[in-house]
């Protein structure tokens, strides 16, 4: 009988995180599910046909990060796969933002990813096996939403993941940044971003994003961009002249429903 592996998924109550939980459960992983909403976590745990531990935590706080970091570093209950997925955006001009809102975004999108990776990676290297998927975004490849700090947070996640991936790749451990484009989840509604005028062909399905991501992880990719249209977009974002990108960003303002900047 093969040994059951354990995955810890943050932001597991909705969207891409819930899709990770379902896909990994279908593969037979035991799960540790993290998010703030205890009841939603328990509901998902009941639905899944594998052993599930729920770990309610607010990853924008030091206490929340400490609790999840302690679980990740517990030598008696090793985690084989960490999915740092919880993340958020803001829908406001930086000129009208607050220190509190910007710090909360950085604590969740950046600090928690660093903190949990630092808790999980050394024991994985010691064991000579383990995987970490950090959910980033195509938004991190260029600043196409003037004034939004979300792309900068995701640029950090992608760069950080690639750097750690290179550090540990010969030690039996894989780290990958998963960079989806627009995906149907609760993300935009939570941020108050109106996407009603965005064309349907832009949108990805969370389950397909997760399947592409897991396939790329197992192929040894350090950065995964699901779907051919977003692969093309990222190629453009990486290679087009900055001036052209800045003009495209000006022309597309308002189309995806960001608040007036
Ligand atoms: N949807 C997209 O178009 C898109 C595109 C590119 C990248 N992404 C990235 O994909 C990741 C997942 O987003 P999603 O689209 O699946 O969003 P979502 O549907 O809004 O789900 C977000 C998840 O994160 C949890 N969460 C939020 N704040 C948290 C906190 N402070 N502490 C712990 N958990 C928290 C939420 O649960 P609770 O409310 O219960 O805490 C929920 O489970 C994010 O990193 C996002 O930046 C999304």
Image (cartoon, rainbow, N blue to C red):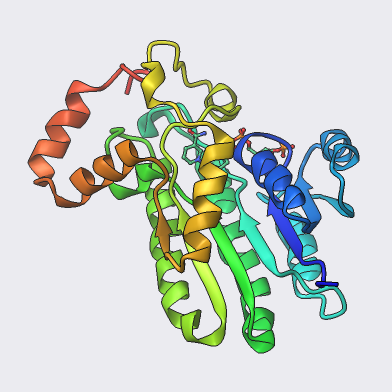
Left or right position of 248 against 19: left
Residue 208 % position (x, y): 53, 39
In the rendered image of this protein, does residue 223 appear above or below residue 258?
below
Residue 230 % position (x, y): 33, 39
In the rendered image, is residue 208 in sight? yes
Of residues 171 and 134, the one nearer the viewer is 171
Seen at 56% across and 30% down, the residue is: 187
- The quadrant of the picture occupied by the C terminus is top left
Left or right position of 253 against 162: left
In the rendered image of this protein, does residue 153 appear above or below residue 163?
above
Seen at 34% across and 18% down, the residue is: 260
Seen at 66% across and 62% down, the residue is: 82
Left or right position of 121 against 250: right
In the rendered image of this protein, does residue 16 appear above or below residue 238?
above
Left or right position of 132 against 21: left
Residue extending furthest toward the front = 1
Of residues 209 and 167, the one nearer the viewer is 209
Looking at the rendering, the quadrant in which ligand 1 lies is: top right
- The quadrant of the picture occupied by the N terminus is bottom right
Residue 237 % position (x, y): 22, 45
């Amino acid at each position: 009988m093969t040994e059951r592996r354990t995955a810890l998924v943050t932001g597991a109550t909705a969207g891409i995180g819930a899709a990770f939980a379902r896909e990994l459960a279908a593969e037979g992983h035991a799960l540790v599910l993290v998010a703030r909403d205890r009841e939603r976590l328990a509901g998902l745990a009941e639905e899944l046909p594998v052993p599930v531990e729920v770990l309610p935590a607010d990853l924008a706080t030091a206490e929340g990060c400490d609790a999840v970091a302690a679980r990740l570093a517990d030598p008696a209950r090793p985690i084989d796969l960490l999915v740092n997925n919880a993340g958020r955006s803001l829908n406001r001009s930086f000129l009208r933002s607050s220190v509190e809102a910007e710090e909360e975004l950085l604590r969740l999108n950046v600090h928690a990813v660093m903190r949990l990776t630092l808790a999980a990676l050394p024991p994985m290297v010691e064991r000579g096996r383990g995987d970490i998927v950090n959910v980033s975004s195509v938004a991190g490849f260029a600043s196409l939403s003037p004034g939004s700090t979300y792309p900068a947070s995701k640029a950090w996640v992608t760069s950080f993941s690639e750097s750690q991936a290179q550090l540990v790749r010969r030690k039996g451990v894989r780290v990958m940044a998963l960079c989806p484009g627009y995906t149907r989840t609760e993300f935009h509604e939570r941020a108050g971003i109106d996407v009603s005028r965005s064309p349907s062909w832009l949108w990805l399905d969370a389950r397909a994003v997760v399947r592409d991501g897991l396939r790329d992880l197992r192929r040894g990719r350090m950065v995964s961009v699901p779907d051919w249209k977003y692969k093309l977009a990222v190629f453009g974002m990486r290679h087009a002249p900055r001036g052209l990108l800045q003009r495209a960003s000006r022309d597309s303002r308002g189309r995806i429903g960001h608040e007036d900047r």
